[in-house]
Image (cartoon, rainbow, N blue to C red):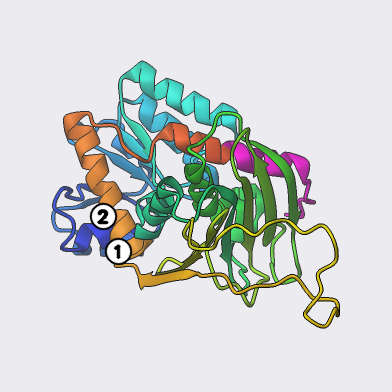
Amino acid sequence: MQIHGAYYLSDKNKYYNVKYVVEADEERRKRAEKTYEGCIALSDYTQLFDKKDVDIVVNASYSDDHYPISKALVEHGFNVMSEKPFAASRYECDDIISAAKKKGVFFTVFHQTLYTPYNKHVKKVINDKTIGDIAEISVRFNNFSRRWDWQTLQKRLAGGVFNTGPHPICVALDAIDYDKDAEVVYSKLLSSPLTSGDSDDYCKIIIKAPNKPVVDIEISSLDAYSDYNVKLQGTLGTFKCTPKSYSMKYIVPGENPERPLIEESLKDENGEPLYCSEKLIFHEESGNYDGDAFTIGTPTLYEDLYYALTEKREMYSTAEKAREVVSVIEAVHALNHLEKKF
């Protein structure tokens, strides 16, 4: 209700009517029928199988149910958009993508972070080379908090890297254009006492690809002082942003004349040792973004989805891109075995 349902009820929704809601809880079924005019509430997704008046099914079930439910819906001829993560492994991703192609139906994944103003700005800064060639891309989705619900259980395909991770990972991979040779070269998962379940609440991922910047991803519930979501270190300066604002500091070529190399120790006018320092001419920019993943990302993705369904346009958030995100998550879990306690 907080994301998809809120969009359907908003004035930004010009494309969709809610025909059916599938909900196991009886009270929420009653609430859904009151909330969405003309809506019919069902208790199980299999009750959709004989419905002929459905253009798209949004699978916002528990994470471990995304794959089997999406696969069943696709095989029954439905267009489907799954919440993230849409599967547990690359094999499952390929299985759904292949099934959708065989049935001639549309399948995609709800990666609304790709449509945010800040992600588009990150791409622009990289492509414009305002801060030069990018040496490192750091993406942080950190906070200082704890959970004690199903999102802390490995058996529910939960934890920080599965639940929050698709957001920073898709931003990071998007920044390197989903390079086919990208690989996880280091990762660490930690399940701290803050988490009631057995899943991770700290994750570090380092990704490399030929001729691409180093990619440093962090998903943490242990960070009380994180001040950015994305930071780019370039050969001419630095850019950092949150979903709400950005700052950038850079030099312009030619404004700081090249200094000749001096191999001997530097000395001042009195012959005393001198530290190598100078005051460079910098330029600084800052500003705010109009909207975030919920107010801009969600409606923009849904608009993109509408035209994909009605005019066969390719979405920016494709299943193939989401598969690469799951591949990173799968690699991280393969390298870091957390004990299953539940």
Helix, strand or loop at label 1? It is helix
Quadrant of residue 243 in the image? bottom left
Residue at horizontal 74 percent and vertical 61 percent from the top = 191
Dot 2, crowdedness within 10 Å: few (<14), some or many (≥20)?
many
Q: Quadrant of residue 10?
A: bottom left
Residue 30, horizontal then vertical, whole percent: 27, 62
Residue drawn at point x = 22 percent, y = 47 percent: 303
Q: In this picture, is 214 found above or below 256? A: above
Q: Is residue 137 left or right of residue 51?
A: right
The percent coordinates of residue 211 (x first, y second) are: 60, 35
Q: Quadrant of the N terminus?
A: bottom left
- Residue 272 appearing in the image: yes
Q: Is residue 292 above or below residue 45?
A: below
Q: What amino acid type should be assigned to the residue bearing mark 2?
A: Pro
Q: In terms of image quadrants, where is residue 207?
A: top right
Chain part drawn in magenta: 327-342
Q: Quadrant of the C terminus?
A: bottom right
Q: Where does label 2 land, which residue?
A: 299
Viewer-closest of 323 and 40: 323
Q: Is residue 214 above or below residue 152?
A: above
Most extreme residue toward the top is 102
Q: Magenta span has 307?
A: no
Residue type, numbered disc 1: Thr
Q: Are marks 1 and 2 in contact (CB under 8 Å)?
A: yes
- Residue 295 is tagged as 1
Q: Residue at x 56, y 39 (%)?
A: 326
Depth check: give the residue in front, 242 or 5: 242
Mark carried by residue 119: none
